[in-house]
Amino acid sequence: MLLTDIILVKTDPIMNQSSIRAEQIVRSLRRKYSVLALGWNRGECTLDKLDNDANLLRVFDLIAPYGNTFRYLTILPMFWTWVFIKLCTHRPKIIHAFNLDTVLPCYIYKTLFKSKLIFDMHDRYAMAFIPWNRGTFLKNTHLIVNSLEEKFANNADFLISVYDKMFTTLKTKPRNCMTIMASPEDQMISKSKVATDSFKLLFTGHVREGRGLDKLLEILDDIKNTELLVTGRIEDRELLKKTYEKPNCKYIGFLDHKQLLDLELRSDVIIALYDFNFQTQHSYGMANKILEAMMCSLPVITNIAGEIIRETECGLLVNYHNLKEIRQAIITLRDNPELRTRLGNNGRKAFLEKYNWKTMEDRLLKIYDLLLSETE
């Protein structure tokens, strides 16, 4: 039997570009504790391309591509079984389960062996992935999954989320909970913006319905001297095809974190738009890309995290369904470089004072110190 202080579980490889927040958590904890990460290779990378330390990471290597829901759901019970066996082998004092699709084997282990369980609710699963307004079956499934997630949230030893408002989606807020935002580690040495003739908008994240890309493609034709750069995981091939049809739109690919940072530093504005009718959780959410923009001194155009946007004055808020309003926000920032600079500097200042990873790391370590003291 192998003994480990902490095991973290997530349904992706953890130590690669698709899991920046999880990777940061692993690295922060590893400075102080014995840590093992359990991940799932969903098919985006081969194992030899992972940042794979034999003493740090174990990867379930039965591939289930993103976007293939049937294969994912078919293999998920096998992943749970593999996780439970690893937990029994390493006997952790604390298990850190990322999102609903990892928590079941962790909760069973906690119940049987009296370990501590941290439930990291980055997404409200049903609110992010199961539309509630597309028929009775999906509506009932949405309600059942939400109820199940709330049960795990209230029975975990500690609940973590990426944004304060996420806790308001629960009927009963757990006593032990804390916000650990998906703040990037500060990598800004200097911002050397390359002068170009075109104004560069940056869209990052998933290429799929409900993320605003289709809205941007509708209004892009008549916005002069403006280029839309798109990067992220492809989940909608038809939408990707439409990006290729626009002369002032360019799909860059699925980038690693360093490549993405380089692209952000060459851009003028970051776009973060979400359809609340399609993914209701985003009305309570905080996108990674907003925090990345703040770190990079870039203004944002968004319809989420209104409290933070207004507090920091780091961007422009728009209505997702109002194309005229989105178009005007783009033109306003394109034609006013002084405004872009002011909003970007405001975001950078707020990042350094409040929204950086060091601040989040301090919160994280306090949680672990508390829970480990209770196991002694």
Image: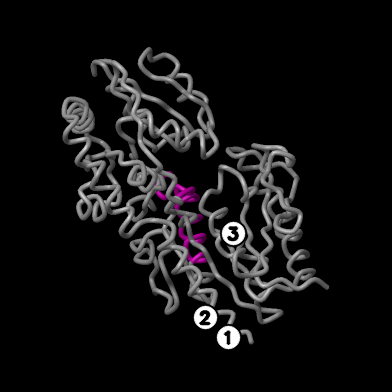
Does residue 274 appear anywhere in the picture? Answer: no
Give the residue at mark 1. 374
Q: Give the left or right position of residue 331, taking residue 12 as reference.
A: left
Could you tell me what secondary structure mostly forms the magenta stretch? helix
Mark 2 element type: helix
* Quarter in which the C terminus is drawn: bottom right
57 in the magenta segment: no
In this view, the residue in front, 183 or 304, is 183
Residue 334 location, quadrant: top left
Label 1 with label 2: CB-CB less than 8 Å: yes
Distance between the Cα atoms at labels 1 and 3? 21 Å
In this view, the residue in front, 63 or 299, is 299
132 in the magenta segment: yes
* Quarter in which the N terminus is drawn: bottom right
Instruction: Judge whether 237 appears above or below 180 on screen.
Output: above
Distance between the Cα atoms at labels 1 and 2? 7 Å
What range is drawn magenta here?
128-149
Tell me residue 21's x, y (percent): 51, 53
Tell me residue 254's x, y (percent): 54, 32
Residue type, mark 2 in image? Leu
Give the residue at mark 3. 26
Give the residue at mark 2. 370
Tell me residue 286's x, y (percent): 36, 52
Residue type, mark 3 in image? Val
Farthest-out residue, right:
1
